Structure formats: structure tokens, C-alpha cells
Image (cartoon, helix red, strand yellow):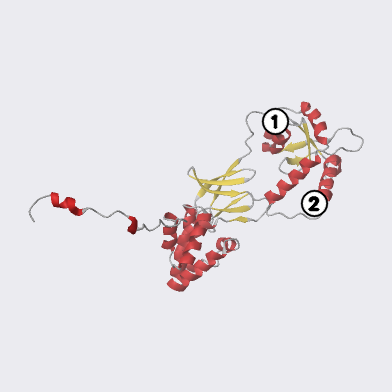
Amino acid sequence: MNGFDFFGGVFPTLVYDNMTTAVQKVLRGKNRILQDEFRKFCSFYSFKTEFCNPAKGNEKGGVEGVVGYVRRNFMVPLPEAESLEALNEDLLKKCLKHGEHVTTGRTKNINQLFEQEKAHLLLIPDNQFCNILHTTGKVDHYSTVVVDKNRYSVPASFAGMKVSVSLGVSRVEIFYEGKKVASHSRFYGNNKWSLDPDHYLDLLEKRPGAFDTARPIRQWRTTWPDAYDQFLSRLRTTQGINKGTKDFISVLKLCRSFKIEEVTRAIDAALKAGVSSGEAVRHLLVHPVADQKSDPVPNWSVLPKADVSVYGQLGGVI
């Protein structure tokens, strides 16, 4: 669907490999039994499908050639990026720039030639195709739900409960009695775990001894700022291991009500102030210290002298 939006229309015929998301069974010749959702997708956008013979990807040689071109010209030397999204954005810019290229034997560049072909595209329907699969699952003792061979966490209080799952292309959303209780980026592959550490904080608050070894916390600690470890160490030193850990968990739970950047700033401020309690961090969030200079002290020497003679006119008995 994103491809249709990018090109501004739907190609009348699309050629596919025999991927399992599209093909349920390969029959003799070009005949295929399609997956129900893929068949609905084709019908919604009114395009025809053609499938390569098994293990014959060369039958769509134009695509394979472009893949090779992109690999040689855009991926060598190996690019570096902060995230997959940033890498995709960089590759998109390079591909768009390539649209200005004039191939051998042509007088117009790629963008100009495509503008001529646009007239042959089918119109995109006004309503977008809904490709969300609805299913059910049961929360296991890890507080996770197995969806499409991967695990996604929910708050620990839902352990043992039956839940509903909406499985989209990029998101997995989990519901209990109609209320959304978890949302994750979708994994592709098998046996991967998406663990939201917030889902386990209430349980760990009751079992602080498991805090350091809990898988969600160990994953989170690889990315959180050094100030978090410093504040945890201070709380444990001043309050003891268990009590200090519980107090620190109460600080982490503040991320439910405040942005994580705000919580981080409050922890930094608490470290600088030398305080040793989670309540101090909460106070700094609710009543942040203004980063302003205080009002100047008045110069009392330049104020007019008071005239007290008026009090003698008030009368009365002393």
C-alpha cells in the first residue's frame, strides 16, 4: 500500500515470488492457491498477479538487476546509520536522486519516463485496505502473548488472561475486554521477545530481589542514562538494597505520567542536590525549579520616609 501511495497509482499487473504471505500452495504451471488475505488485497486494488516458477527469481530480472545496482552503488562502502529508519530515509534520498539519471539509449531521465507511464496506472481507492488480522491468545507466566511465533508483553496483572490481538503490518496491539493493554512494534522472524519494562514494574516492586536479573530490566539498562544507575546506587546505599530498589522502581513508574526526558532531568537534579529519595524526584517533576534569577532585593535607602503625623488625627483613647 505504501508503494501505491508513493507511485501515485496501482500497477495493473504485479509479479511475485512464491512467498508464503501470498501463496498458500503452488500448483502445476502458473496456478496458485492464494492466501485469503492476499486474495482480498488483490481484489481491493483490482490488479492481476503473476508468479515466478519456484526457484526462478531470474524471471523478474529487471527487479534483480535494480537490486544489484542499489547494492553496488548505495551500499558500498557499508553505510552507517543511527537506526533502520534513518538508513531507509538515506536510501530513499539516493533513489530519488537516481531518478535524474538518463539510461543508455534514452533521451529522457527516469523521472520523465515514469511521468509518461503514470497514465497507465489504476486509481487508488478512496478508502485504504485494512490488512489487520484479528486473533486471540492467552497471557503466559512470562506476562507475554505468543503472536505469529514471537512474544509480546502485557502488564503482569493480566497473567493467565485470554486477550484479543490485532496484528498489523508494523504494529501488534493487545486488548482485554475491549481495552488496549499493550502495543508493540511487530517482529519478523521467530522466537523474538518484545518486552516493555513498564509491564513488570508493579511485580518487581513486590519482588525487589529479582530487579537486577529480570530480563526486561537488563535490556532497558543497556540504554538508560548513567544517572539512573547512580541514583539507584545512592538509594540502595542510604536505604538498604530492598527498600532502595523499591524506591527506585517508584521513580521508574513516574514515566507513566511524565515524559521520560522529564524524569531523566529530575533524576539529574536530584543527584546534584544530594537527595536520596524517590519522593524528591516526584517533587521536582511536579514543582520544577525555575531556571530564572530571583527578583532583586529592593534598595530601601531610596524609598520615601513615612509621614506618621497622620496617626495623631485619628483620635481615640489611649
One can see residue 17 in this view = no
Label 2 packing within 10 angstroms: few (<14), some (14-19), many (20+): few
Label 1 or label 2, whichever comes before in sequence order: 1
Rendering coords of residue 314 (x, y %): 13, 49
Residue placed most toward the observer, 199 or 136:
199
Which amino acid type corresponds to the residue marked 1 in the rendered image?
Tyr
Rendering coords of residue 261 (x, y %): 53, 55
The local secondary structure at tag 2 comes to loop
* Residue 54 vertical placement versus 47 (above, below): below
Mark nearer the viewer, 1 or 2: 2
> Which residue occupies the extreme top position in the image?
119
Residue placed most toward the observer, 9 or 147:
9
* Residue 50 vertical placement versus 230 (above, below): above
Q: Mark 2 sits on what residue? A: 75
Looking at the image, residue 185 sits to the left or right of residue 60; the answer is: left
Residue at 50% x, 70% y: name it.
233
* Residue 266 vertical placement versus 103 (above, below): below
* Residue 5 vertical placement versus 64 (above, below): above
One can see residue 38 in this view = yes
Which amino acid type corresponds to the residue marked 2 in the rendered image?
Met
Q: Which numbered circle lies on residue 132?
A: none
Q: Mark 1 and mark 2: span between their CA atoms?
A: 33 Å
> Which residue occupies the extreme left position in the image?
317
Q: Mark 1 sits on what residue? A: 45
> Which residue occupies the extreme right position in the image?
105
Label 1 packing within 10 angstroms: few (<14), some (14-19), many (20+): many
Rendering coords of residue 69 (x, y %): 84, 46
The quarter of the picture where the C terminus appears is bottom left
Q: Quadrant of residue 116?
A: top right
The local secondary structure at tag 1 comes to helix
Residue at 50% x, 67% y: name it.
232
Rendering coords of residue 142 (x, y %): 54, 58
